[in-house]
């Protein structure tokens, strides 16, 4: 029964998001730019970009160069680089950019990312404040697109569309698919004011958020999720700017990816526990009634199905071992007959899985189109489906184990 | 911004329920088609057996050349695999599948009897094994291993006929066969050359009990070599 329930919830989530995709408007309706122009009050505030750095000598210059290429008026930009006690050439590289009038560079003792960001927020000149990681690169239109969304005065934060920067190997190309899927999810959740994470990389907030709610907290190494939950708790809406592109460098190795995803999964689980009162609570709108419950159930489902998968795999391995032990390994030509459709799995759960897979393929397709206009689905999509489900579930399982055993996870 | 659009949640629920119902309908439709395929395969096997029986009855000693090993054994074996698969998969058609299983067991018995008659008439030895198993937990711990052995033997000696019977199947003809050969419920049970063996037998054990398997393999290898020789192009 539990298996049927899991499949129902998974399919429900996909259908909900696809219905949202088909809806014309979301919960946010801003004045048209033309109307604002006619009134002579086109919204164009000062924007502060905080760049916290710690030993980022390889990528910092590239990040700052992408900021310099922003089309947003430079007299409305305020860039604050905070070196959080780097031990390499990071500060030296950053200092070279202080020649620009709108770039300020600071150095402080190492205290963790959230301390660097909070320091940057405290000295920010802008009405809108965002954070950019030093291994991320912004599109020239990114800030302009984000400011457009803030025209709706009710919106308190806006998330970007994050892409993978220059994928080098198969693992990074599979992550491209995942990030494209996230672009779709973020746009849909953004439409409903249902995003539970405003990612640290280039999400922007009105200064009022930090004035009213305080800055980032050291929350299980996922400060961005904690802040987002705190915002929803105080009814501070979060929207999305689907054309505000920022590219980030993703892990190149399986170990690197595992460390990153374990941190995310751990943070996800413990933040959900901290904010559990919001789950299934109508007071918190679609976050409380959709994102958090489906997220929690999906996490449980992933753990359950992974354990079931491990059990089934173990059974198959045991049976194969028994067969080899009984009769050895032999190959006979007659064993390899043509494919017989009779043995194709057409059980109820197999058909439901097909529907869920198709819905996900549609989401990937839309996310890909939003990301780069590309509509081709290559082999990377196949690898994504084969690899990611299992990998994410393993990270979630380990994260849940760490939570239960009281083990913390680290950044690196 | 924090108001819920209840209508959307309800519509989503209804669409999801509709998709679930569609999945149920589609999977039922597929299992129905597969059951039909099994029925049609069984009809074909029944006609083949009937045809062989008629042929055998109508002709004289010369029939030994005409009524030999046909493709019947392969079709029966593939049918058996499909019936076993269907038993595991088609919960909703379980009565139909049970009926198919009984029908399949009867076809196996008919084929076994026909093979025996031909062997008696043509003074040859039938190369066949009767195998009794149980699917009930705890009733036959070695049945899985025995299955691997019989599959291996069938692959190694394509002329070998293996007739598998579920000991617990509610079929009077099967119960008669069990009592005729005095098969006790100590499974797996094998009947080879009229003798009953009530324990697991490895590949080597069966090969020792059936030395005719080696002759069968030699004949099959010779036939394959002859076929390869005639299909080879000659270069002038």
Image (cartoon, coloured by chain):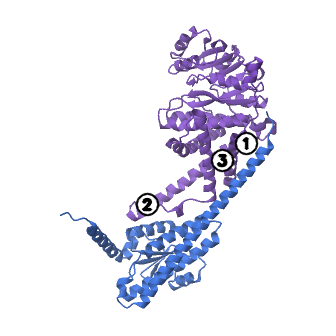
**Chain B in the picture: what colour?**
blue
Q: Mark 2 lies on which chain?
A: A
Query: Image point 48% across, 83% down: which residue?
Result: B50
Q: Residue at x 46, y 57 (%)?
A: A321
Of all chains, the one bearing label 3 is: A
Which residue was labeled with disc 2? A325
Q: In the image, which disc is placed on residue A293?
A: 1
- Read off the chain for label 1: A
Distance from the alpha carbon under mark 1 to that under mark 3: 12 Å
- Locate residue B144 relative to residue A306 in the image: left or right: left
Is residue A219 in sight in this rendering? no
Return the residue at label 3: A301
Q: How far apart are marks 2 and 3 (CA)?
A: 35 Å
- Determine crowd level at label 2: few under 14, some 14-19, many 20+ residues with C-alpha closer than 10 A: few
For disc 1, the neighbor class at 10 Å (few under 14, some 14 to 19, many from 20) is many
Which percent across, then down, holds residue B136? 59, 69
Q: Where is residue A65 in the image (x, y as percent from the top left)?
A: 54, 18
N-terminal of the pair, mark 2 or mark 3, is 3
- Identify by letter the chain in purple: A
Say yes or no: labels 2 and 3 on the same chain.
yes
Q: In this view, does A176 lie above or below B17?
A: above
């Amino acid at each position: 029964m539990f298996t049927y329930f899991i499949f129902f919830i998974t399919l429900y989530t996909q259908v909900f998001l696809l219905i949202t995709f088909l809806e014309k408007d979301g919960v946010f309706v801003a004045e048209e730019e033309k109307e604002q122009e006619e009134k002579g009050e086109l919204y164009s505030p000062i924007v502060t970009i905080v760049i916290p750095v710690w030993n980022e000598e390889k990528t910092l210059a590239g990040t700052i160069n992408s900021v310099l290429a922003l089309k947003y008026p430079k007299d409305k930009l305020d860039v604050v680089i905070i070196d959080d006690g780097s031990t390499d050439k990071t500060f030296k590289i950053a200092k070279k950019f202080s020649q620009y009038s709108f770039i300020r560079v600071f150095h402080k003792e190492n205290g963790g990312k959230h301390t660097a960001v909070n320091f940057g927020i405290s000295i920010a000149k802008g009405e809108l404040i965002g954070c950019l990681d030093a291994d991320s690169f912004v599109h020239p239109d990114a800030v302009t697109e984000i400011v457009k969304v803030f025209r709706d005065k009710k919106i308190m934060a806006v998330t970007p569309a994050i892409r993978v920067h220059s994928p080098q190997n198969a693992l990074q190309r599979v992550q491209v698919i995942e990030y494209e899927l996230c672009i779709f999810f973020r746009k849909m959740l953004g439409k409903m004011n249902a995003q539970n994470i405003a990612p640290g990389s280039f999400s922007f907030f009105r200064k009022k958020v930090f004035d009213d709610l305080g800055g980032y907290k050291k929350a299980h190494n996922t400060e961005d999720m904690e802040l987002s939950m705190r915002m929803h708790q105080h009814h501070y809406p979060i929207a999305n700017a689907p054309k505000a592109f920022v590219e980030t460098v993703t892990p190149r190795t399986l170990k690197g990816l595992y460390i990153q995803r374990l941190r995310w999964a751990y943070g996800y689980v413990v933040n959900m526990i901290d904010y559990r009162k919001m789950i299934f609570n109508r007071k918190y709108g679609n976050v409380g009634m959709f994102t958090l419950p489906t997220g929690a159930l999906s996490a449980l489902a992933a753990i359950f199905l992974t354990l079931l998968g491990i059990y089934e795999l173990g059974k198959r391995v045991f049976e194969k071992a028994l067969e080899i032990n009984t009769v050895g390994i032999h190959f006979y030509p007659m064993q390899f007959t043509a494919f017989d459709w009779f043995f194709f799995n057409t059980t109820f759960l197999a058909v439901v899985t097909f529907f869920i897979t198709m819905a996900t393929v549609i989401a990937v397709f839309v996310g890909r189109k939003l990301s780069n206009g590309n509509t081709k689905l290559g082999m990377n999509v196949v690898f994504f489906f084969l690899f990611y489900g299992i990998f994410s579930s393993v990270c979630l399982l380990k994260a849940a184990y760490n939570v239960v055993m009281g083990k913390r996870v680290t950044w690196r | 911004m924090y108001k819920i659009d209840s209508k959307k949640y309800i519509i989503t629920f209804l669409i999801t329920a509709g998709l679930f119902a569609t999945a149920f309908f589609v999977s039922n439709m597929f299992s129905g088609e597969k059951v039909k395929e099994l029925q049609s395969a069984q009809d074909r096997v029944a006609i083949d057996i009937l045809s062989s029986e008629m042929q055998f009855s109508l002709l004289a000693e010369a029939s030994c050349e005409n009524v030999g090993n046909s493709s019947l054994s392969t079709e029966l074996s593939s049918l058996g695999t499909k019936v076993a698969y269907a038993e595991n998969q088609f919960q909703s058609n379980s009565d139909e599948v049970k009926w198919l299983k009984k029908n399949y067991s009867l076809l196996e018995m008919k084929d076994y009897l026909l093979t025996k008659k031909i062997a008696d008439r043509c003074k040859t030895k039938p190369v066949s094994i009767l195998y009794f198993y149980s699917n009930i937990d705890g009733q036959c711990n070695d049945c899985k291993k025995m299955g691997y052995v019989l599959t291996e033997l069938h692959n190694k000696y394509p002329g070998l006929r293996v007739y598998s019977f579920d000991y617990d199947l509610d079929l009077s003809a099967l119960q008669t066969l069990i009592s005729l050969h005095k098969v006790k419920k100590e499974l797996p049970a094998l009947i080879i050359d009229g003798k009953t063996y009530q324990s697991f037998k490895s590949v080597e054990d069966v090969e020792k009990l059936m030395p005719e398997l080696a002759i069968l393999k030699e004949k099959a290898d010779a036939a394959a070599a002859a076929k390869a020789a005639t299909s080879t192009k000659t270069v002038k």
